[in-house]
Image (tube, rainbow, N blue to C red):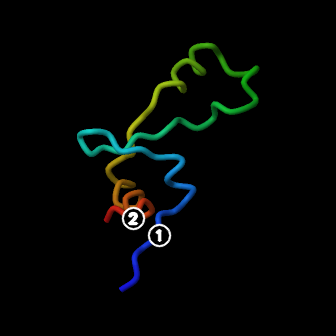
């Protein structure tokens, strides 16, 4: 069996934490920021974790499953 390549888009977007969770960035923080409130932009700054329903799909893209 050949090795599975890592999806190059996924490796730029996701990172594993020390406990095995998958970190991700929030969407809607790249442009059209003038109409968004300061609170909304501030809350989008913090990293989030991938939901458990999407975890297996992301691990497959990262060739870790």
Give how far across and how far down residue 15 sits, in percent.
Answer: 41, 44
Which of the two residues, 53 or 23, is positioned nearer the viewer here?
Answer: 23
When asked about the image quadrant of residue 18, the answer is top left
Give how far across and how far down residue 32 sits, in percent.
Answer: 76, 29
Residue found at the far top of this picture: 38
Kindly indicate whether the residue at mark 1 contacts the one at mark 2 (C-beta within 8 angstroms).
yes
Q: Residues within 10 Å of mark 1 (few under 14, many from 20)?
A: few
Disc 1: which residue: 5
Q: Which mark is residue 63?
A: 2
Q: Quadrant of the N terminus?
A: bottom left
Residue at 34% across, 60% down = 56
When asked about the image quadrant of residue 29, the answer is top right
Residue at 47% across, 25% down = 46
Residue at 26% across, 45% down = 20
Q: Residues within 10 Å of mark 2 (few under 14, many from 20)?
A: some
Vertical arrangement, residue 39 with respect to residue 12, above or below: above
Q: Quadrant of the C terminus?
A: bottom left
Question: Helix or strand or loop: what does disc 2 sit on?
Answer: loop
């Amino acid at each position: 069996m050949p090795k599975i390549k890592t999806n190059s888009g996924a490796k730029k977007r996701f990172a594993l934490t020390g406990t095995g969770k998958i970190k991700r960035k929030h969407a809607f923080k790249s442009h059209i920021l003038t109409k968004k409130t300061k609170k909304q932009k501030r809350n989008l700054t913090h990293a989030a974790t991938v939901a458990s329903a999407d975890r297996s799909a992301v691990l497959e893209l990262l060739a870790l499953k």
